Amino acid sequence: MKQRDQKIILGYLQKQLKAPLGEPIMIEFRYYCPDGRRDPDNICGYFHKIFLDALVESGKLRNDGFRNVVGFVDSFYIDKKSVRIEIDIHENMDRD
């Protein structure tokens, strides 16, 4: 399942990110779910992993360690008509 989902993400990354990211980065994830039945940590934990692995595999991020990623912001919403994940990547983030 991880390989399948990561391959889908790679396709989106190749279309939407043309150059490597300015590191370190901070990522904002907005999850739009059909209902509130799933626990938020089950949604975001898995997606963080496959999204960062796809960024590295695509060459857009050198690594997904402390020097490359300063953090995440996760927000959860209910949208029965349009289930999706929206992502903003903030580049060249300061740790201070």
Image (spheres, rainbow, N blue to C red):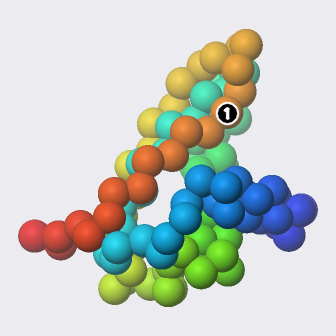
Q: Is residue 70 above or below residue 75?
A: below
- Point out the residue furthest to the left here: 96
Residue at coordinates 54% horizontally, 75% vertically from top-left? 60
Q: Secondary structure under badge 1?
A: strand
Residue at coordinates 85% horizontally, 69% vertically from top-left? 3
Q: Quadrant of residue 66?
A: bottom left
Location of residue 53 in the rendering, given as x and y in whole percent from the top left corner = 65, 74
Residue at coordinates 67% horizontally, 33% vertically from top-left? 84
Direction from residue 45 to residue 89 in the image, left or right: left
Quadrant of the image for the C terminus? Answer: bottom left
Direction from residue 82 to residue 86 in the image, left or right: left
- Point out the residue furthest to the front here: 18
Location of residue 47 in the rendering, given as x and y in whole percent from the top left corner = 65, 56
Quadrant of the image for the N terminus? Answer: bottom right
Residue at coordinates 50% horizontally, 86% vertically from top-left? 62
Residue type at mark 1 is Arg
Q: In which quarter of the image is residue 67?
A: bottom left
The tally of labels here is 1
Label 1 environment density (alpha carbons within 10 Å; few <14, some 14–19, many ≥20): few
Location of residue 31 in the rendering, given as x and y in whole percent from the top left corner = 58, 36
Quick check: can you spot residue 53? Answer: no
User: What residue would you read off at disc 1?
Assistant: 84
